[in-house]
């Protein structure tokens, strides 16, 4: 039970009547400035809840007297931005990608937009700046499986590589030499030695060279420099999509690789595809 409320002789404040181990609790009022600020925040909260969306209901919410939401404001800004870009995008849509590149103003617009579009759609695989990763081509060098000109890059972006549901997609199929029983493990080991020697990685293998001539030159060429029409990589330039160590090359020869790139024409509009092509071409390895 609280003890008797009395006035503290030291501070001059009344006590609350509570006492613990001889220590009495003072009934000190809150500072007036703090109370005024607190009351102001309560009033501010009430006014804000009336003016702007606030109280949720079962199926909707109170939309506020002003009817303002950040979502609507962002949507309005996006609509204005789209309207401002529409003139440029319509021009890009009506022109070929090489014509867009030749127009300085459209080229600047395409590069700026392409940079953002690449970050949104392509960087997850090709990394920021197009530097690539294991199994994902580096778009900033001058090594191209299917060609590095603007029309060729546009074609690859538009229709993809081994993309399902697109009749114009890039198609190539390397045999699974071990899995399909075409070569033995020993023969594949010899071919791997020869393939590595084409890039100056280790000694050549005569048996491997012979098997390469019989099985691989149809796609990779007699000199091993590849064939862009088939998407067959250049084996002499020391640029490797999956790795240059022998174990990786043996794995590739044995079971093949079947990487897939989406056909972006099914997801992005024509102007966006062209802007992406121009940006990729400008990364450093375009031809």
Image (cartoon, helix red, strand yellow):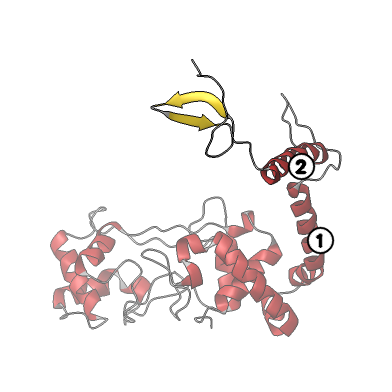
Tell me the SS state at disc 2: helix
Few, some or many residues within 10 Å of mark 2 (<14, 14–19, 20+):
few
x, y percent for residue 194: 21, 76
Identified at 46% across, 61% down, the residue is 125
Nearest-to-viewer mark from 1 and 2: 2
Please give the residue where the numbered disc 1 appears in the rendered image. Answer: 80
Identified at 57% across, 30% down, the residue is 7
Q: Find residue 82 and report its image quarter.
A: bottom right
Give residue 44's mark: 2
x, y percent for residue 285: 49, 81
Classify 27 as above or below 125: above
Classify 69 as above or below 163: above
Identified at 80% across, 65% down, the residue is 86
Whether residue 103 appears in this view of the structure is: no
x, y percent for residue 111: 64, 75
Whether residue 271 appears in this view of the structure is: yes
Classify 201 as above or below 55: below
x, y percent for residue 180: 26, 53
The answer to whether the residue labelled 1 contacts the one labelled 2, judged by CB atoms less than 8 Å apart, is no
Q: Is residue 191 left or right of residue 165?
A: left
Q: Is residue 62 left or right of residue 254?
A: right
Few, some or many residues within 10 Å of mark 1 (<14, 14–19, 20+):
few
First in residue order: circle 1 vs circle 2: 2
Q: CA distance from mark 1 to mark 2?
A: 33 Å
Q: Find residue 107 and report its image quarter.
A: bottom right
């Amino acid at each position: 039970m609280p003890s008797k409320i009395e006035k503290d002789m030291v501070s001059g404040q009344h006590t609350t009547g509570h006492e613990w181990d001889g220590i009495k609790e003072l009934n000190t009022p809150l500072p007036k400035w703090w109370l005024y600020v607190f009351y102001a925040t309560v009033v501010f909260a009430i006014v804000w809840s009336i003016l702007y969306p606030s109280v949720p209901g079962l199926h909707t919410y109170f939309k506020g007297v002003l009817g303002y939401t950040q979502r609507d404001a962002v949507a309005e800004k996006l609509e204005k931005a789209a309207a401002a870009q529409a003139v440029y995008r319509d021009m890009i849509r009506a022109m070929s990608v090489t014509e867009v590149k030749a127009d300085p103003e459209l080229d600047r617009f395409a590069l700026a937009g392409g940079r953002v579009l690449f970050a949104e759609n392509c960087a997850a695989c090709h990394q920021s700046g197009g530097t690539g990763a294991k199994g994902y081509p580096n778009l900033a060098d001058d090594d191209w499986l299917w060609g590095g000109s603007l029309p060729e890059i546009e074609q690859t972006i538009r229709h993809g590589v081994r993309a399902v549901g697109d009749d114009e997609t890039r198609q190539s199929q390397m045999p699974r030499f071990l899995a399909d029983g075409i070569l033995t493990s020993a023969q594949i080991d010899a071919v791997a030695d020869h393939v590595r020697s084409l890039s100056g990685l280790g000694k050549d293998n005569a048996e491997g060279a012979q098997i390469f001539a019989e099985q691989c030159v149809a796609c990779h060429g007699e000199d091993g420099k590849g064939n862009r029409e088939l998407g067959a990589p250049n084996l002499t330039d020391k640029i490797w999509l999956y790795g240059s160590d022998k174990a990786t090359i043996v794995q590739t020869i044995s079971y093949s690789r079947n990487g897939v790139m989406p056909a972006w024409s099914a997801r992005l509009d024509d102007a966006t595809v062209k802007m992406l092509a121009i940006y990729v071409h400008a990364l450093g390895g375009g031809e």
